Amino acid sequence: METVVGIRDLKTHLSRYIRQVKAGAILVITERGKPIGRLVPIASSAETRLSELLQAGMAAWSGRKLAPLTPVARARGERVVADLLLEDRG
């Protein structure tokens, strides 16, 4: 949701617009009808977003860390996988 607001109106009703930004709104600030800036909410941390998803029942998590994945392919000797790919393409 994006709201366009003139700088004079923003100064007059700053508290109201700050509440809107806290609620997730984006404000485009104009001066004499021309956009000069944007006021946006700060993004939540990954932990906060995960917590919100869990509380909403949109995700499930045991709280345990995932086990590391085993590599699908290994290069023999001192060769690098990227070099093998380039060699295969040529």
Image: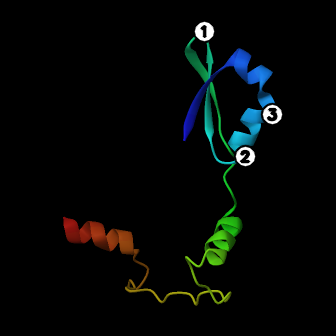
Which residue position is annotated with label 1? 32
Q: Which of marks 3 and 1 is in front?
A: 3
Q: In which quarter of the image is residue 37?
A: top right
Q: What residue type is labelled 2?
A: Lys
Q: Earlier in the sequence, mark 3 or mark 1?
A: 3
Q: How far apart are marks 3 and 1 (CA)?
A: 22 Å
- Tags 2 and 3 in contact by the CB under 8 Å rule? no
Q: In this view, does 82 lie to the left or right of 67?
A: left
Q: What residue type is labelled 3?
A: Ser
Q: Quadrant of residue 4?
A: top right
Q: Tag 3, which secondary structure?
A: helix
Which residue position is annotated with label 3? 15
- Tags 3 and 1 in contact by the CB under 8 Å rule? no
Q: Quadrant of residue 34?
A: top right
> Callout 3: few (<14), some (14-19), or many (20+) C-alpha neighbours within 10 Å?
few
Q: Which residue is drawn at 72% across and 46% down?
A: 22
| Closer-to-camera residue (88/78) | 88
Q: Above or below — where is 82 with respect to 54?
A: above
Which residue position is annotated with label 2? 22
Q: Tag 2, which secondary structure?
A: helix
Residue placed farthest to the top in the image? 32
Q: Above or below — where is 68 with respect to 80?
A: below
Q: Distance between the residues labelled 2 and 1?
A: 26 Å
Q: Which residue is drawn at 38% across and 83% down?
A: 75
